[in-house]
Amino acid sequence: MAFKHSKAHLRVDHEIFEVFRRNRTTRSYRAPLCQLKVRTDARGGGVTRLHCSNIAQLDEPIHAPKTRPGRLLVTIEIPASEEPLHRAYFTRLDQLSEFVAAS
């Protein structure tokens, strides 16, 4: 599964979640799907930030509406109008992660 954005490419391949950024100063991010955590942060000017990091608890959902303290490994800014598309993508990844864990 892949989601392409003008500034980033998000994909899952063989249960590994990857983010590749067009910005050369920010490194890419890779994590097992079962360890992925994504938080959103609404900003001014119609921008939403997606913060990717690793879960702290195994029963933690992939996606939640607000950021929590902890180490953020990569942040992607998207137009706020695209947040529902990203939310649907991460909901699907959460379902996939649960399926993989049950296998």
Image (cartoon, grey):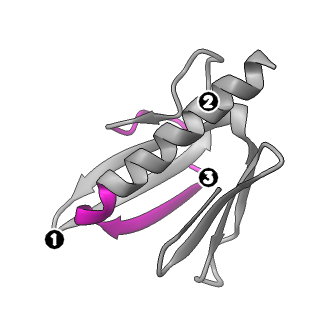
Residue at the spot of label 2: 55
Q: Which quadrant of the figure contains the C terminus?
A: top right
Q: Which residue, given by chain and number where applicable, does mark 1 sit on?
A: 45
Q: Earlier in the sequence, mark 2 or mark 1?
A: 1
Report the span colored magenta: 66-83
Name the kind of residue labelled 2 in the image. Answer: Ile
In the picture shown, does residue 98 fall above or below 82? above
Give the spatial CA distance, label 3 vs label 2: 11 Å
Name the spot of residue 96 as percent of width and height, x first. 64, 34
24 relative position to 4: left or right: right
Q: Secondary structure at mark 2?
A: loop
Is 2 colored magenta in this rendering? no
Which quadrant of the rendered structure holds the N terminus?
bottom right
* Three-letter code, disc 1: Gly
Residue designated by label 3? 73
**Residue sitting at 39 percent across and 46 percent down?**
87
Question: What element does badge 3 sit on?
Answer: loop
Give me the residue at 31% from left, 49% from top.
41
